[in-house]
Image: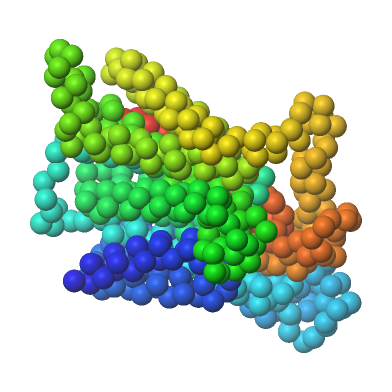
């Protein structure tokens, strides 16, 4: 009963996070934090041994590493220690608010909010990993071997969705949007947690299917809203000039859809590679296949994937489109490698051709003019001259590097970039208050210093290792 309730709370969190405008407001974040905490505790009550198993993994210690750094930044320190560790921070205190007790975070309240957001991600991540664990004596329904094999493609789909956001984070700040950050860690947990036949396969499939179905519904809403927008999200909610779906910003909608559509694509690939269609003899038998439940399921996910991918294009997010395409190139490269081993190159060609055809039809139907117009800023001569959106990003990065130079050891404090950046900004921009660096990696380094660099190196090493492990298991 408790596991059932915990699953319900996890799904409720995944449901509310995008619908609450991406959960960018503090009250929305608190609601998600509460849901994740209660769900974690319910799972812990039923499976306390699963937490012990979690702490035997390197992912647990990596997460604790960055959490300890953030917590140490809000602990009061003596002025002498601050001066020794961070001279630039000491000068800041002398100029603006000197006192007997100082913290390594320039603005402790910003760091406290960032810690709450980080813990929310963490509880979702840990809850999924604990929920995936099971003991041999668990009474679970027997799963067919083909279903296990299909799940290997779904794990690759999870990690491919994560890869897309990792690409996108070079150009934007999706991981700072709570809804996208939560889906990011959930997909990461599903990709790395289901790494053996001892995991709860039924829970894994339920989570994957929920994310695909919900992502599809959000994409349908985005299409409907595109043709009927009245100035309010949901037609009666917040005002926004150019939202896509429930998101205030098109880049963040694209980031959310990158995660969901990657799973849908992997579901289609898994279905085609393990279909009975190719084992049927004769035209009539193959034609009858389209009346089977297997065919209906495969075609249903194909349609969902096409719709979701098309909304990434209609969002006109340059970073989202390029990141998704790069991650899918990687995904299908791995699938082609697996198809070569199994001598199923023909199926691979069929899959790619069909998906491209479906997506092209959807994009043309919805209207390609908007996103094609956005890409005129990426003409070769503009890239060479660093003009357009590239120039704006470079100005961000250049000024952010000055922050890194002044605070190389401990950073300015997790979550403090926006408040602190006003002192370093050297360029004019239409937005007077710039909260994010438009590069999640650079922002993390400005806020956590050397610790952030170490975290990123370890994260990418462990993530690459997980990708290789999943790719080798494809059959």
Could you say where residue 371 lies in the image, as x and y percent from the top left?
Answer: 64, 38
Would residue 425 be found to the left or right of residue 101 on screen? right
Whole-percent x and y of residue 44?
29, 70
Picture quarter containing residue 79? bottom right
Q: How many numbered marks does the figure carry?
A: 0
- Image spot of residue 405 (x, y percent): 81, 55
User: Residue most toward the bottom?
Assistant: 100
Q: Is residue 173 above or below residue 195?
A: below
Query: Is 330 or 63 nearer to us in this picture?
Result: 330
Q: Tell me the quarter of the picture where residue 351 sits.
A: top left
Identify whether 339 is placed above or below 423.
above
Q: Quadrant of the N terminus?
A: bottom left
Q: Residue furthest top?
A: 282
Q: Is residue 348 visible?
A: yes
151 relative position to 360: left or right: left
Q: Name the residue nearer the viewer: 309 or 30.
A: 309
* 41 shown above or below 272: below
| Residue at point 35%, 50% (across, down) | 213
Q: Is residue 447 left or right of residue 39?
A: right
- Image quarter where the C terminus lies is top left
Q: How is the image coloured?
A: rainbow
One can see residue 57 in this view: no
Please name whichever residue, 221 or 200, is drawn nearer the observer in this view of the structure: 221
> What residue lies at 82% left-to-right and 57% top-to-bottom?
430
Which residue is drawn at the image coordinates 67% and 81% (left, top)?
Answer: 76
- Observer-nearest residue: 136 or 65? 136
Q: Is residue 306 left or right of residue 39?
A: right
Give the x, y percent position of residue 138.
13, 57
Q: Residue shown at 78%/77% (left/top)?
A: 80
């Amino acid at each position: 009963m408790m596991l059932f309730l915990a699953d319900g709370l996890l799904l409720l969190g995944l449901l509310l996070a995008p619908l609450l405008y991406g959960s960018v407001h503090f009250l929305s974040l608190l609601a998600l934090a509460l849901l994740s905490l209660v769900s974690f505790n319910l799972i812990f009550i039923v499976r306390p041994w699963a937490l012990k198993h979690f702490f035997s993994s390197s992912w647990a210690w990596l997460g604790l590493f960055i959490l300890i750094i953030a917590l140490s930044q809000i602990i009061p320190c003596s002025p002498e220690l601050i001066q020794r560790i961070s001279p630039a921070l000491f000068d800041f205190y002398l100029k603006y608010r000197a006192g007997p007790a100082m913290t390594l975070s320039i603005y402790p309240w910003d760091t406290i909010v960032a810690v709450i957001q980080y813990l929310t991600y963490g509880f979702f991540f840990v809850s999924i990993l604990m929920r995936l664990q099971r003991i041999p004596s668990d009474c679970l329904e027997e799963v067919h071997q083909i279903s296990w094999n299909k799940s290997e493609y779904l794990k690759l789909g999870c990690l491919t969705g994560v890869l897309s956001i990792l690409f996108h984070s070079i150009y934007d700040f999706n991981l700072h949007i709570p809804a996208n950050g939560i889906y990011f860690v959930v997909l990461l947990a599903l990709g790395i947690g289901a790494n053996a036949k001892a995991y709860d396969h039924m829970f894994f499939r339920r989570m994957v299917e929920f994310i695909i179905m919900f992502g599809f519904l959000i994409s349908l809403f985005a299409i409907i809203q595109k043709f009927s927008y009245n100035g309010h999200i949901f037609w009666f909610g917040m005002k926004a000039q150019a939202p896509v779906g429930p998101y205030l910003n098109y880049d963040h909608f694209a980031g959310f859809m990158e995660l969901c559509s990657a799973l849908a694509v992997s579901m289609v690939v898994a279905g085609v590679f393990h279909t009975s269609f190719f084992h049927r003899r004769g035209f009539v038998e193959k034609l009858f296949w389209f009346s089977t439940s297997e065919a209906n399921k495969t075609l249903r996910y194909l349609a969902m994937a096409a719709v979701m991918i098309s909304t990434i294009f209609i969002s006109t997010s340059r970073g989202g489109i390029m990141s998704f395409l790069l991650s899918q190139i990687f995904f299908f490269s791995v699938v082609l490698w697996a198809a070569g081993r199994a001598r199923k190159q023909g199926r691979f060609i069929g899959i790619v051709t069909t998906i491209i055809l479906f997506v092209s039809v959807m994009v043309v139907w919805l209207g390609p003019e908007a996103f094609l117009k956005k890409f005129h800023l990426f003409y070769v001569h503009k890239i060479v001259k660093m003009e357009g959106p590239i120039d704006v990003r470079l100005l961000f990065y250049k000024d952010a590097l000055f922050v890194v130079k002044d605070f190389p050891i401990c950073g300015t404090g997790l979550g403090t970039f926006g408040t602190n950046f006003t002192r370093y900004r050297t360029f004019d921009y239409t937005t007077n208050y710039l909260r994010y660096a438009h590069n999640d990696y650079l922002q993390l380094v400005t806020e956590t210093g050397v610790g952030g660099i170490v975290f990123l190196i370890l994260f990418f090493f462990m993530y690459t290792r997980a990708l290789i492990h999943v790719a080798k298991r494809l059959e």
